Image (cartoon, coloured by chain):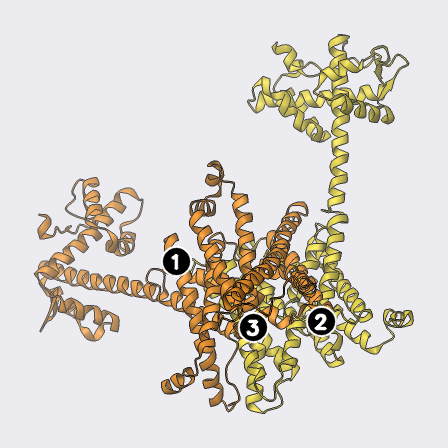
Amino acid sequence: MFTEFFQRLSVWEGIDTWIAVTGALAAMACALPGTWLLLRRQSLLGDALSHAVLPGIVLAYLGVSWMEEIGWLTAPATGSGAARVAEGMSLVARRQLALFAGAALSGVFAAVLSEVIQRWGRVERSAALGVVFTSMFALGLLLIRLFADRAHLDPGCVLYGNLEATAFNRLGDTTIPQAVIVNGGMLLVNALLTLLFFKELRLSTFDPDLAAAQGMRPSLISVALMSVTAATVVAAFESVGAILVIAMLIIPAATARLLSDRLSTILLLGIVVAAVGSVLGHVMAITLPAMICSRLGMPQVEDASTAGMMTVAACSCFLLAVFASPRHGMARAWYERWRLKLRIVREDLLGSLFRREEAASSQPQAANQQATIGDPARLSWFQRLARQSLIRQGLVESGSHGDSLTESGTAAAQDLVRSHRLWESYMARHFALPNARLHDTAEKVEHFLGPELQAELAAELDQPTTDPHGKVIPTPPERL
Amino acid sequence: MLNSDIFRVLTLQDYNTRVVLCGTMLFGACGGIVGAFMLLRKKSLVSDVASHAALPGIGLAYLILEALSPGTGKSPVWLLVGAAIGSASGLFCAGLIQRTRLIKEDAALGIVLSVFFGFGIVLLSVVQSLPTGSAAGLSEFIFGKAAALTAADVTTIGVASVIIMLACGLLFKELSLLCFDDAYAAALGWPTWWLDLLLTTLVVAVTVIGMPSVGLLLVVAQLVIPPTAARFWTDRHSVLTIIAGVLGSLSSAVGILVSAVIPRLAAGAVIVLAGTTIFLISMLLGTRRGILWNWLSQRESHRRIGQLDLLRACFEVLEREHSFTSSPESDPATMPLSFEQLQAARSWTASRLRSILSIAVSDGSIRQGADGKYRLTSEGMRLARRATRNHRLWEMYLIHFAQTAPSRVDREADEIEHVLAPELVEQLEELLEQDRVRTRLPPVSPHAQLT
């Protein structure tokens, strides 16, 4: 299987590198504004924006093709290599500027419109967004159909982009795709803006009121963030399309959020996840579908949409983070819960052994009947595991009459039983509970009383020596 | 296009147009009805996620059918089943992601939407490279093919719509309570979890039956726009649901007819834009929350407040200048008021005062004499006495029961005096009487006594 994987991967060429780089740059550029949107709980705004910019883009495309017709945007056929690259650059810049302008205009229009609907019509926020972005998206699709022969826009491309084709759309005579320049430029701009306005963005995200009190104008920052998001979406648009760009906005940011609690780390990790996800996506696109389909009897399948696979790869990173994040992962939570459970069962075993020995010392004949408490055959598998670890650590030793506590085991058990009985005394004094009801709560609380709380309880109760049931409250040797 | 062709389309003489119209209108009605619940539950965009998440379901259904027996991949029923499974698992995943607690609802929905769609795109590109599968049959699900709906499609849509509407009708009370106050519903012992699941199922069902006609990208519009538009016309949930259904099928009908007349327009997009037009009209003209209606009623209350302020000012000027007692016998016609006196009474600009006065004159509460002075009519006097009385009652109330400083009561009373209902005035009188402040009651101003 691995040989097949590497065999399929060996067809990797220069163009594959450019595809991966283009995708990675687009994803990295999106990850920065995406993180802010995620933290502001406005992720769906990215969704809405990526739909709403469509009519603007179509109109800009029409404008660009009109400009090409009148000769504004055509490269001269002659000239030296360097001059043609420079000319090519300025062409890309002019063309992209037109697209940016169109998209930014319709993005801002959509934002203002949904604000107006929300405020004047008193419509709930997500409904207002829904009305605006579906309407504008429908308008964009309609425009594409109407001017299909002039704008060279394919509705399919609009949705899921054509990363493979954009990599062939090169800059002048070089092998560098135009999309690399555009998305790379956008990444630089976003990184610069994030660095310059880090303080403002951070404060207005986490505490808009405080930001306003410091004279920062959070609404202006929010509008600026929206414009930058719109521009980033447009830059990535040609490569990955309107819907997959949502994945690039949200998923790296969400993954990074699961991995860290520090803002700067989240921003950096988001970029890293975006890059990794994109490269992984292209690798998966040219290997996995063929490997799976050839086994299903469909050998014709060679590869699959890279942009689509990039979202799948990014999602795999996200799922990995959900599972294995060091701080918030499910694996960590399970492990913590398991450790806590083990500790409680171990302590309960110690406690029951202590009580048995305590009873044996006062009534020797009763002890023989209870000798089976430590009988391994009557324990659950988890209790057996706990018992083994107690024996291994030398807190319990097993003998012919069942288990018994060692010296250090007795000390640990005394500490626990002290917690238990102190808590019972405390409850008896301060809560109007019958004595029979004290045990159950104490059984839970005993595991969580540290030495400080024990000392406080003892002081509060004037250093008691017996609990409400008349049993002695033990004192571990080191506290004497 | 010839006029006769347009006439043919609009009078539904084509069998095809009738079939298509029937199918899309049924879907429009269902979308509006189910969307009304989602609007109240503030989860309008859930159906967006449901529709995008359907794509991998469609792709997988096609691939499985092709793998089992080549050539059967485009069976519409199985593709719809695949779509439904895709949507449902998408919404399920969104629920799971939210359980991490760090990723909130918006991000969870966005992640599911884009990842499922991305995976769907991967599957579509795989389908495309199969010799049997031009993805044409599948991309119809993305963009819709309303014009090419067949009678069989419409039968499927019809049966599903009837089931959806029946479910909404039979469980209307339960679903409404879920939307308005799910905690209360849970406290009453209703199975809110199951009701929520039912509502989600309904959303998935509507989304799926809408896909063949408007396409999965725009299905959400039929669940969001009609209910939001209906909200401008009513405050009652049952009426809202019905209006939303009607508006939904209306926008479908308009969209289908327009796109039948102008063949280059894609029906799905036109249906959505027809809905948008209906929305904008509703927002402008709606009788409950419409902008125009709000503006008119605001203007009316502004005008009323201006009149009451004027009458009270007249009363207070008369009280000061003519030191009259407010016994009903005193004749207002004998007490002229000059423009300057009135303007000094409140911070009116001359033009504002002039316009208020002209309204008062046309209302008949004030007369302008030949000497240019103004006099209250007897009706005006009655109104002025009442306005002043309300103002002072409220001032007394504020002083005696709300511990407001006497220097501030005038401003606060100013804001509330216009909305005191007669019953409230009675209550105030009773309250103040109990407190034995009857002797200080209006028309004596509390300020007069304090100074």
Q: Is residue B50 above or below residue B292?
A: below
Q: Position of residue B231 (x, y in %)?
A: 70, 52
Q: CA distance from mark 1 to mark 2?
A: 43 Å
State the residue position of label 1.
A268
Q: Nearer the viewer, mark 1 or mark 2?
A: 2
Q: Are marks 3 and 1 in contact (CB under 8 Å)?
A: no
Same subunit, tags 3 and 2:
yes
Q: Nearer the viewer, mark 3 or mark 1?
A: 3
Q: Are marks 1 and 2 in contact (CB under 8 Å)?
A: no
- Chain of the residue under label 1: A
Same subunit, tags 1 and 2:
yes
- Chain of the residue under label 3: A
User: Quarter of the image containing the N terminus of chain A?
Assistant: bottom left
Q: Secondary structure at mark 1?
A: helix
The amino acid beneath tag 2 is: Asp
Q: Position of residue A419 (x, y in %)?
A: 20, 51
- Rendered yellow, the chain in question is B
The amino acid beneath tag 3 is: Asn
Same subunit, tags 3 and 1:
yes
State the residue position of label 3.
A162
Q: Residue at x 26, y 50 (%)?
A: A435
- Chain of the residue under label 2: A
